[in-house]
Image (spheres, helix red, strand yellow):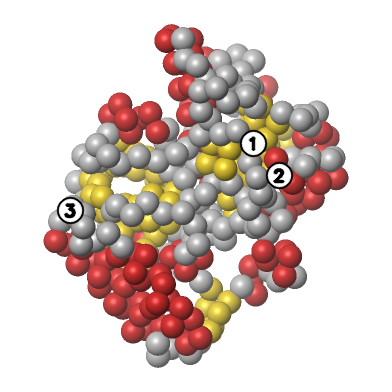
């Protein structure tokens, strides 16, 4: 699955990050162990003790000391945890890890807050964009992070990358997600059952983010996205645009470099946020640039997009021009793409501690 399709991210060994950057380098645990995602299964019976002893308390941590959005939301969380524990103690079949298991070692905020659906649009034929109104003024996130997504009546907890900027939340109390249709229960609910004013519960998590601080040395970014993996990188792109705007209008102390986005999809119709991205390029010429890549385009590419579209995959030749000591690389997409791009970067001499990724499945 991909960010926004019901899965959740994982990475490899953590490395020291440059100023303002956090994430994972490209050497994944799966690759190091010689296993693939298709082999990344577990026997539920063997995991039961670990989950009951560690993950459920993490899920409910702070529940008694904080005000929950409603009794129903707390009930959903407790029922979800109970169903998972009882099921995992009896079923002995193999299956892939779910979102909470796979991200058990990732950072998570303790507070779980209520959110209400205030907008639903079709970002593409298979992706819905959600606007969630959040009343809790203490709720924050960093560009690139994800949320645990708790749905009343659905025992499975979703994991979706945030695609909006932190400043939108601060200004308007709005957070956005873009979710691709799958049969995974949370994504399926979003596409078939959720409506305006539907209420859900959210909790922020993730170690993949870009959060530069005033006084940090400027760093250039190369963002590389595949498919719906654009979500966390679009959040980072919007955050940088906001910082540029503040810098120009209010004398912001952030020192910002340039940003280059490489975004690959099968066709231009599957390129999410493309109009927004073109708008950012026009608003910040030379500071924000983008190259769209399409691999299975059959129809004519519209005139507006043509100057920015390349047919074919992202190549070593595309990336080598950006190699420098002050460049950080952020990647998000399907596991095969992560591994392919990682090898390209290694081949052109990019240091491992300058590469960060969110690996979804």
Q: What's the CA distance linking mark 3 and mark 1? A: 37 Å
Q: Is residue 148 left or right of residue 152?
A: right
Q: Answer with mark 3 or mark 2, whichever residue precedes in sequence.
A: 3
- The residue indicated by pointer 2 is 353
Q: Quadrant of residue 182?
A: bottom left
Quadrant where the C terminus sits is: bottom right
- The residue indicated by pointer 1 is 18
Local SS, label 3: loop
Up the image or down, 266 lies above or below 165; here it is: below
Local SS, label 2: helix
Q: Is residue 328 left or right of residue 51?
A: right
Q: Quadrant of residue 318?
A: top right
Say which of 204 and 253 sits in front. Answer: 253
Question: Within 10 angstroms of label 1, few (less than 14), some, or many (20 or more) residues?
Answer: some
Say which of 217 and 112 sits in front. Answer: 217
Say which of 115 and 182 sits in front. Answer: 115
Question: Within 10 angstroms of label 3, few (less than 14), some, or many (20 or more) residues?
Answer: few
Q: Answer with mark 3 or mark 1, whichever residue precedes in sequence.
A: 1
Residue 67 tag number = 3
Question: Within 10 angstroms of label 2, few (less than 14), some, or many (20 or more) residues?
Answer: some
Task: Decide if residue 344 is in sight here.
Answer: yes
Up the image or down, 27 lies above or below 140; here it is: below
Q: What's the CA distance linking mark 3 and mark 2? A: 40 Å
Residue 89 at x, y percent in the picture:
40, 87
Residue 158 at x, y percent in the picture:
39, 60
Q: What's the CA distance linking mark 1 and mark 2? A: 8 Å
- Residue ID at (79%, 50%): 343
Q: Tell whether label 2 touches label 1 (CB within 8 Å).
A: yes
């Amino acid at each position: 699955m991909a960010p926004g399709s019901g899965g959740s991210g994982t990475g490899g060994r953590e490395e020291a990050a440059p100023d303002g950057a956090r994430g994972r380098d490209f050497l994944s645990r799966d690759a190091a162990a010689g296993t693939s995602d298709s082999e990344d299964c577990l026997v539920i019976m063997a995991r039961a003790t670990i989950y009951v002893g560690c993950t459920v308390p993490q899920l409910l941590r702070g529940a008694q000391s904080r005000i929950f959005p409603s009794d129903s939301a707390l009930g959903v969380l407790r029922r979800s945890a109970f169903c998972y524990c009882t099921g995992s103690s009896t079923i002995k079949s193999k299956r892939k890890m779910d979102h909470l298991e796979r991200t058990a070692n990732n950072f998570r905020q303790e507070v779980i807050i209520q959110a209400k659906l205030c907008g639903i649009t079709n970002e593409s034929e298979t992706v819905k964009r959600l606007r969630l109104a959040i009343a809790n003024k203490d709720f924050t996130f960093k560009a690139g992070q994800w949320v645990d997504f708790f749905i009343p009546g659905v025992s499975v907890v979703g994991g979706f990358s945030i695609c909006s900027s932190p400043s939108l939340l601060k200004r308007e109390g709005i957070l956005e997600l873009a979710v691709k249709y799958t049969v995974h229960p949370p994504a399926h609910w979003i596409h078939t059952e959720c409506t305006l004013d539907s209420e859900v519960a959210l909790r922020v998590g993730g170690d993949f983010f870009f959060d530069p601080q005033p006084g940090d040395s400027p760093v250039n970014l190369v963002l590389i996205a595949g498919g719906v993996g654009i979500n966390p990188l679009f959040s980072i792109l919007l955050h940088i645009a906001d910082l540029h705007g503040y810098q120009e209008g209010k004398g912001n102390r952030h020192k910002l470099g340039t940003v280059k986005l490489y975004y690959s999809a099968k066709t231009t119709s599957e390129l999410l946020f493309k109009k927004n991205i073109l708008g950012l390029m026009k608003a910040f010429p030379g500071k924000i640039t983008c190259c769209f890549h399409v691999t299975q385009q059959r129809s004519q590419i519209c005139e507006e997009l043509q100057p920015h579209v390349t047919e074919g995959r992202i190549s070593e030749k595309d990336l080598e021009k950006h190699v420098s000591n002050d460049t950080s690389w952020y990647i998000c997409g399907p596991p095969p793409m992560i591994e392919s791009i990682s090898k390209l970067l290694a081949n052109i001499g990019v240091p491992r501690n300058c590469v960060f990724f969110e690996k979804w499945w």
